[in-house]
Image (tube, coloured by chain):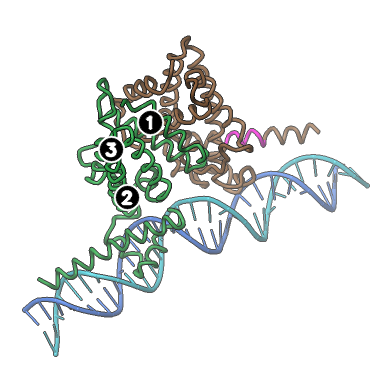
Chain colours: A brown, B green, C blue, D cyan
Amino acid sequence: MSVQERKQRERAERERLIVATARELAEQQGWDAVTTRRLAERIEYSQPVLYSHFRGKREIIGAVALQGAADLATAVRAATSAADRPRARVTALARTYLDFAARNPAVYDALFQLDGGLAYAQEDTPEPLKDAFAALLECLAEVAGDSVHPGLFTETFWAALHGLATLTRAGRLLPEDAESRVELLVDRLAIV
Amino acid sequence: MSVQERKQRERAERERLIVATARELAEQQGWDAVTTRRLAERIEYSQPVLYSHFRGKREIIGAVALQGAADLATAVRAATSAADRPRARVTALARTYLDFAARNPAVYDALFQLDGGLAYAQEDTPEPLKDAFAALLECLAEVAGDSVHPGLFTETFWAALHGLATLTRAGRLLPEDAESRVELLVDRLAIV
DNA sequence: CTCGGTTGTCTAGCGATGCTAGGATCGATT
DNA sequence: AATCGATCCTAGCATCGCTAGACAACCGAG
């Protein structure tokens, strides 16, 4: 038995290596540079090995996305729990979210821009994605106001942040005023 | 002279044909299906002809984006000018924007998702892009409130719409509640 | 300890992509 | 009417995601 267990361990380890390498390469040179050949070379295996772990490139992107969702949830929870008033929590959430998107552009792309073959807003949505949304919901529910459903409020607030994140990173918005835009968003949307 | 003029006319006509065909093909089957070979076949010329009009695929996407920006500006102006009160104008703007994104997904992608090699938020930004932003600004400036710069307000409102548009289309948000989210956004962000 | 078989990996290659070089062909000008 | 330049196409390059089939290494049984 222990032989099979060791093999399974090694296999899992290699899978982690693939995902980590893909993420690293994507952050360094963009997702266009993440080709199956380059990725295979970096992990020092041949191309077909990738396909024994993942169905294709899409699934590799999806794996990076799931990891990113977990990281994002962690970052958001850490930031919100460090603030004591609802208003401060929301501001911290917004800043952290945008900061995450700016610092991990490739991961953010894997999550929301690229096709990672993941299901969203459905029953079979992977747990990390649900949890990331839950992390937002936990904080935003308390400033949704009485007349608005917390889930709907979270979706809308999240969409606003997502818009800011993508437009800023794509060069459509100048980063200088990022903080002002966050203030505006929190001021108007959050009911304290 | 008239010969050269005719040639120039025909050349310009063919360029329009390329852009229109690319847009059509993208809307029908997605941008992945817009390959230089397929595009060349549809316009009934060989591949290299495309490269005598555009530097590459990126520039073709950019051309579609510019056309889309003009269309978007027109649609927004038509919708806002049909409403008589500021609040109604903003709601119309939001609905029209999201409707445009939903009805012309490929064009919207060319504008904001794909790399069309266009400059944004800069001096050398193409006129249609500036004008599309101006169309938003004209309407949104009157509900920005006194304490907030109109440009900044427009950027933020636009980002929120953009987030709703992309997340909805990518399946991250369910389309059923789209109207509620628009109401929420207008209610809270716009100061009437 | 040896042998058979399974499991795992690699080499090689397929079709398709964006893009380009070089020759052929057509037509306007002298 | 002949020339010469503009215009277009055939053919091909490098690279992409992905896969088939050969090969080797290793485990378990006798």
The residue sitting at 42% across, 23% down in the picture is A94
**Image quadrant containing the N terminus of chain A:** top right
- The chain letter for the residue carrying disc 1 is B
Image: magenta residue range = A11-18
Q: At which x and y percent is residue A119?
A: 58, 40
Distance of label 1 from label 3 (alpha carbons): 16 Å
Q: Tag 1: residue type? A: Val
The image shows residue C3, relative to residue B6, as above or below, that is above
* Quadrant (top left, top right, bottom left, bottom right) of the C terminus of chain A: top left
Gap between marks 3 and 2 measured at Cα: 26 Å
Write the residue at 60% across / 38% down.
A122
Q: Observer-nearest residue: A185 or A99? A: A185
Lower sequence index among marks 2 and 1: 2
The residue nearer to you, when weighing B37 against D25, is B37
According to the picture, the residue beneath numbered tag 3 turns out to be: B84
Crowd class of label 1 (few under 14; some 14 to 19; many from 20; radius 10 Å): many
Q: Identify residue type, mark 3.
A: Asp
Residue that mark 2 sits on? B68
Mark carried by residue B186: 1
Residue A2 image-quadrant placement: top right
Which chain letter goes with mark 3?
A: B
Tell me the residue at 25%/65% (across/down): B13
